[in-house]
Image (cartoon, rainbow, N blue to C red):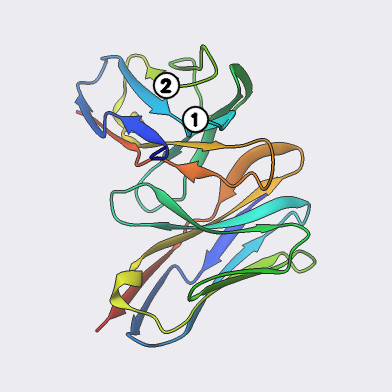
């Protein structure tokens, strides 16, 4: 059974810092891994999708990496801004099912 | 296409009442998912459709829950005899079977059972 864990649970940083959010999963037979952003009371916004055959994906100031052998993914946010404050969720999907298994998220606060 | 649409955005209901939520996926997506999220937790899978066929249901989906996708387009999630423990955010997502299968979520329906 796939389990996804995210650390830290919460993070507070000053504006401008580069930061790394961690995601680990127990079953390396994943189909893809997806990172989402969620603002309070809102739905999920897809940030990056990494296929199992890929090692990383980049979008603007965001870079996500995937290491299947170690069961880890990281989301790197460069030059953080107050507008980046949100909860970041990672989710893994498996070959034998299309559902996403989510971590509990990292709540990020970037202060000016 | 404006993305995945969910209605209503908020629903307050008395315990014991039935409620129904609607999800309109991205038009070319043939896969549709329902998730439930409680405060401080990640979303938990409830069920998923490929076209009109319901292919998987979670053990979380008790007999009081039923989902349909009658023509392979929009979907409804009904909860009968609501309980306070049903209070949560209900999220719908869609994806395409082809390509990278990236999942896109709606804004959710916040259910409060009083």
Question: Mark on residue A90?
Answer: none
Which comes before the other along the chain, label 2 or label 1? 1
Secondary element under disc 1, as helix, strand or loop, is: loop
* Side (left or right) of A82 relative to A56: left
Q: Is residue B17 depicted above or below A87 in this figure?
A: above
What x and y, as percent, mark residue B22? 37, 23
Most extreme residue toward the top is B70
Location of the C terminus of chain A by quadrant is bottom left
Quadrant housing residue A109: bottom left
Q: Is residue A5 depicted above or below A22 in this figure?
A: above
Secondary element under disc 2, as helix, strand or loop, is: strand
Of badges 2 and 1, the one in the foreground is 1
Looking at the picture, do discs 2 and 1 lie on one chain? Answer: yes
Quadrant housing residue B90: top left
Residue beneath the point at 58% across and 16% down: B52
| Residue tagged 1 | B27
Residue beneath the point at 67% across and 48% down: B100
- Distance of mark 2 from mark 1, alpha carbons? 19 Å
Q: Residues within 10 Å of mark 2 (few under 14, many from 20)?
A: some
Residue beneath the point at 76% across and 38% down: A96
What x and y, as percent, mark residue B111? 28, 32
Q: Is residue B79 depicted above or below B43 in this figure?
A: above
Q: Circle 1 marks a residue in which chain? A: B
Q: Nearer the viewer, residue B28 or B10?
A: B28
Q: Nearer the viewer, residue B45 or B48?
A: B48
Residue beneath the point at 54% across and 30% down: B32
What x and y, as percent, mark residue B79? 37, 19
* Side (left or right) of B28 relative to B9: right
Question: Mark on residue B77?
Answer: 2
């Amino acid at each position: 059974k796939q389990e996804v864990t995210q650390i830290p649970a919460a993070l507070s940083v000053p504006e401008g810092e580069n930061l790394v959010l961690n995601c680990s999963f127990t079953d390396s037979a994943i189909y893809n891994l997806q990172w989402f952003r969620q603002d309070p009371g809102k739905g999920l916004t897809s940030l990056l999708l990494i296929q199992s055959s890929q090692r990383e994906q980049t979008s603007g100031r965001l870079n996500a990496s995937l290491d299947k052998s170690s069961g880890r993914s990281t989301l790197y946010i460069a030059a953080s801004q107050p507008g980046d404050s949100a909860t970041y969720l990672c989710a893994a999907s498996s070959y034998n099912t299309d559902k996403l298994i989510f971590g509990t998220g990292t709540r990020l606060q970037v202060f000016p | 296409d404006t993305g995945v649409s969910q209605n209503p955005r908020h629903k307050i209901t008395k315990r014991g009442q039935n409620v129904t939520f609607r999800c309109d996926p991205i038009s070319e997506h043939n896969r549709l998912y329902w998730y439930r999220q409680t405060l401080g937790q990640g979303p938990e899978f409830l069920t998923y459709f490929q076209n009109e066929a319901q292919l998987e249901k979670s053990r979380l989906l008790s007999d009081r829950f039923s989902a349909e996708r009658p023509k392979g387009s929009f979907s409804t999630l009904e909860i009968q005899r609501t309980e306070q423990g049903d209070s949560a955010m209900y999220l719908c997502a869609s994806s395409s079977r082809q390509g990278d299968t990236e999942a896109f979520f709606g804004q959710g329906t916040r259910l409060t059972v009083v």
